[in-house]
């Protein structure tokens, strides 16, 4: 009884928040922007910037080499669409770094519970993170292509008509880059969400793309439709075959173009649905 009588309530000065309630949309935008900045190491230490910006430097260097080839020798080393496929392995490494940073790290103890304590649903969280990964890939692939377009346009001799044709090629390249971003981003995000430790998440992302590649190579030896559709066993091979059919007009790939369109769309949709299901079951 004496303990109750001697107890004291201390006023620590805590007050209820009386400012504006910015709501769910603001939370989604803030999470998206924070995640996109984190993908490039912005707002973090110098070490966090080394890997993503080194890859960006490589992509920009390749774009400069393409411009130099057109300006000096009149020869194009690769098209805009081929740029995406040529550097696809580096894109996977970039996604492994990005997804492990902005997705896997949040699976640590108590982190998700802080997010979901706000007016933010699990689907909102997935949408913001997925959009950040896809946007990061689009910036990685799109900005060098815009540099290529600017440099090649200045090197052309046929004026406005040549620039117009070049713009059409750029649109095709950016369209293929968006397909790359959707497929690689969705699969990479799903793989990263399955691991709570960043190192294992990065390994899982790389494995999701590189392990199926030799399987597709073995299947390609087969005759008939199985050999023609073998690239569907590997996301990177499927994207390359789709590029050949849609943007390079390869007669070998044209006959199965719809199969590759359906296959690539199915990869992105299944990975996105899997990501949503993963966060419905993950403990907050």
Image: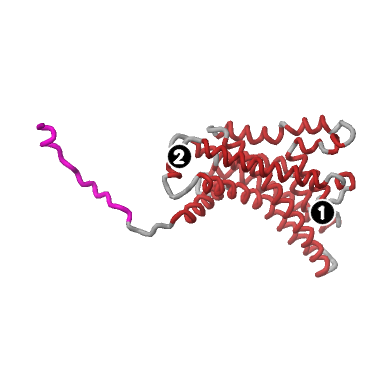
**Residue 271 locus on image (x, y percent):** 64, 40
**Which residue, given by chain and number where applicable, does mark 1 sit on?**
69
Q: Does the magenta segment cover residue 203?
A: no
Q: Which mark is residue 150?
A: none
Q: Does the magenta segment cover residue 3?
A: yes
In this view, the residue farthest toward the bottom is 160
Q: Residues within 10 Å of mark 2 (few under 14, many from 20)?
A: few
When asked about the image quadrant of residue 151, the answer is bottom right
What residue sits 65% from the left and 48% below the top?
137
**Which residue, given by chain and number where applicable, does mark 2 sit on?**
111
Q: Nearer the viewer, residue 268 or 85?
A: 268
Q: Residues within 10 Å of mark 1 (few under 14, many from 20)?
A: some
Q: Nearer the viewer, mark 2 or mark 1?
A: 2
Q: Are marks 2 and 1 in contact (CB under 8 Å)?
A: no
Magenta region's main secondary structure? loop
Q: Is residue 11 left or right of residue 136?
A: left
Report whether residue 151 is seen: yes
What residue sits 67% from the left and 47% below the top?
182
**Residue 49 locus on image (x, y percent):** 57, 45
User: Which residues make up the magenta segment?
Assistant: 1-17
Q: Is residue 11 left or right of residue 151?
A: left
Q: Quadrant of the N terminus?
A: top left
> Distance between the Cα atoms at labels 2 and 1?
49 Å
Q: Is residue 65 above or below residue 99?
A: below
Report whether residue 60 is seen: no
Q: Is tag 2's residue or tag 1's residue first in the polypeptide sequence?
A: 1
């Amino acid at each position: 009884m004496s303990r109750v009588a001697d107890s004291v309530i201390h006023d620590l000065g805590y007050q209820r928040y009386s400012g504006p309630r910015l709501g769910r949309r603001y939370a989604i935008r803030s999470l998206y922007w924070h995640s996109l900045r984190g993908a490039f190491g912005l707002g973090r230490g110098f070490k966090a910037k080394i890997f993503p910006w080194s890859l960006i430097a490589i992509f920009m260097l390749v774009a400069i080499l393409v411009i130099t080839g057109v300006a000096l020798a009149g020869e194009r080393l690769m098209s805009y669409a081929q740029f995406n496929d040529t550097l696809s392995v580096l894109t996977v490494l970039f996604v492994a770094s990005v997804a492990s940073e902005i997705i896997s790290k949040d699976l640590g103890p108590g982190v998700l519970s802080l997010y979901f304590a706000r007016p933010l649903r699990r689907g909102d969280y997935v949408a913001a993170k997925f959009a950040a990964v896809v946007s990061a890939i689009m910036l990685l692939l799109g900005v060098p292509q815009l540099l290529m377009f600017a440099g090649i346009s200045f090197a052309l001799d046929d004026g406005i008509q040549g620039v117009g044709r070049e713009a059409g090629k750029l649109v095709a390249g950016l369209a293929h880059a968006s397909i790359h971003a959707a497929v690689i981003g969705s699969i990479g995000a799903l793989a990263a969400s399955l691991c709570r430790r960043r190192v294992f998440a990065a390994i899982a992302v790389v494995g999701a793309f590189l392990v199926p590649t030799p399987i597709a190579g073995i299947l390609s030896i087969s005759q008939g439709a199985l050999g023609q559709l073998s690239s569907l066993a590997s996301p990177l091979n499927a994207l390359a075959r789709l590029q050949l059919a849609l943007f390079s007009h390869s007669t070998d790939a044209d006959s199965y173009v719809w199969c590759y369109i359906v296959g690539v769309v199915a990869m992105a949709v299944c990975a996105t649905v899997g990501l949503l299901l993963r966060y419905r079951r993950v403990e907050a």
